[in-house]
Image: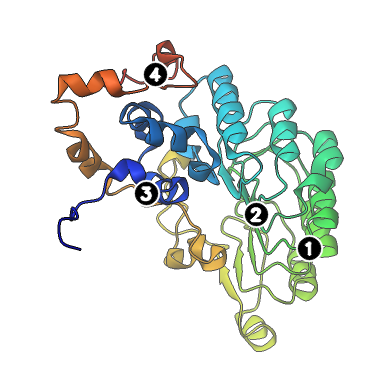
Amino acid sequence: MEGESAFRNWDELIPDALGLIFKHLSLQEVLTVIPRVCKSWGKAVTGPYCWQEIDIEEWSKCCQPEHLDRMLQMLIARSSGSLRKLCVSGLHNDMMFTFIAENAGSLHTLRLPRGEMSDSVTEQIAGRLSAITFLDLSYCNKIGARALEAIGKNCKMLVGLCRNMHPATGKLTQDDEANAISATMPKLRRLEMAYHDLSTESVLTILCSCSQLEILDLRGCWDVKLDDKFIKGKFPNLKILGPNVKDCYNDWDDCSDYSDGSEYLAWEFLAGGMGDYDDDDDDDDDELYDGMWDDEGRLEELELRFYDGIVEDAGVYGWPPSP
């Protein structure tokens, strides 16, 4: 219409639209920069729209345990029961695992690699994870067949399980885990059990019980001997990775976890586009804020929010203060 401005104010966007935009930014920017832009953006960041999918896996690998607990408590509380995806590495006790389960009513994807959860607590809280469809418990050394059995019995919609282990776990055999999976997870389409000490018999039991399997990762399962002709004839839609691992050297730190079939390993294969966000654009994010603070007078109009108002916490998380 004539006389009407051709420009729309960004602070007038509805919160769910802002959430869709902000999730393409880094965690640090969402928590330290966005709240200082304007009141509506700060309100959106403290609400559930930005935290339906929480991925702090990379950040959690480097932080102190107490900082991880505080971050999880804050972000999960902000999700207000709408959390659909959570990725975090290195949970250091059962208390935080229980806290996650208590807020898992809408959770579909849960990735907890390198966690310190126990069998006993997993058995207690597995019923609260009933909506889970994708679960990553790789490198969780304190859980075993008991935990997997409880998960299988309660998570009836589970179609993807990552249970990869480090090559030097020291466990004598893990056939009990394979048996728990075959007995309780018949709907699996993807299963990763790299570097498990498995027998051929236990793997064949999984194949017969989980008839919908499309990808089975057995890299590093050296004792498994499968006949290629038999597998192709009986399971024509199945892709098996391993047991041999390519590009592996004497030092395990230099050992690649990827074979020539690694293009099949993307979680998007099952998650339908719910995989991790691409961080390649993070380098461009700083350009968005180049001129944001030029107008000093505008600073007086801002509601400075950071970690629920505690600006000093920036140093606690190892991040510099916002501009």
Marks 1 and 2 close (CB-CB < 8 Å): no
**Nearer-the-camera pick, 117 or 195:** 117
- What separation in Å lies between label 1 and label 4 (alpha carbons)? 41 Å
The dot on residue 21 is 3
Which residue lies at the image location 50% right of the left edge and 32% below the top edge? 46
- What separation in Å lies between label 3 and label 2 (alpha carbons)? 22 Å
Marks 1 and 4 close (CB-CB < 8 Å): no
Which residue lies at the image location 24% right of the left edge and 41% below the top edge? 285
| Extreme residue toward the front, this view | 2
Picture layout, residue 71 above or below residue 25: above
Dot placed on the residue nearer the N-terminal end, 1 or 2 = 2
Amino acid beneath label 4:
Gly
Q: Quickly name the residue at label 4.
A: 318
> Residue 66, percent across and down?
58, 17
Amino acid beneath label 1:
Met
Tag 4: Cα neighbours inside 10 Å, few (<14), some, or many (≥20)? few
Q: Quickly name the residue at label 1.
A: 185
Visible residue check, residue 117: no
Dot placed on the residue nearer the N-terminal end, 1 or 3 = 3
Picture layout, residue 258 above or below residue 240: above
Dot placed on the residue nearer the N-terminal end, 4 or 2 = 2
| Extreme residue toward the top, this view | 312
The dot on residue 316 is none
Which residue lies at the image location 82% right of the left edge and 40% below the top edge? 125
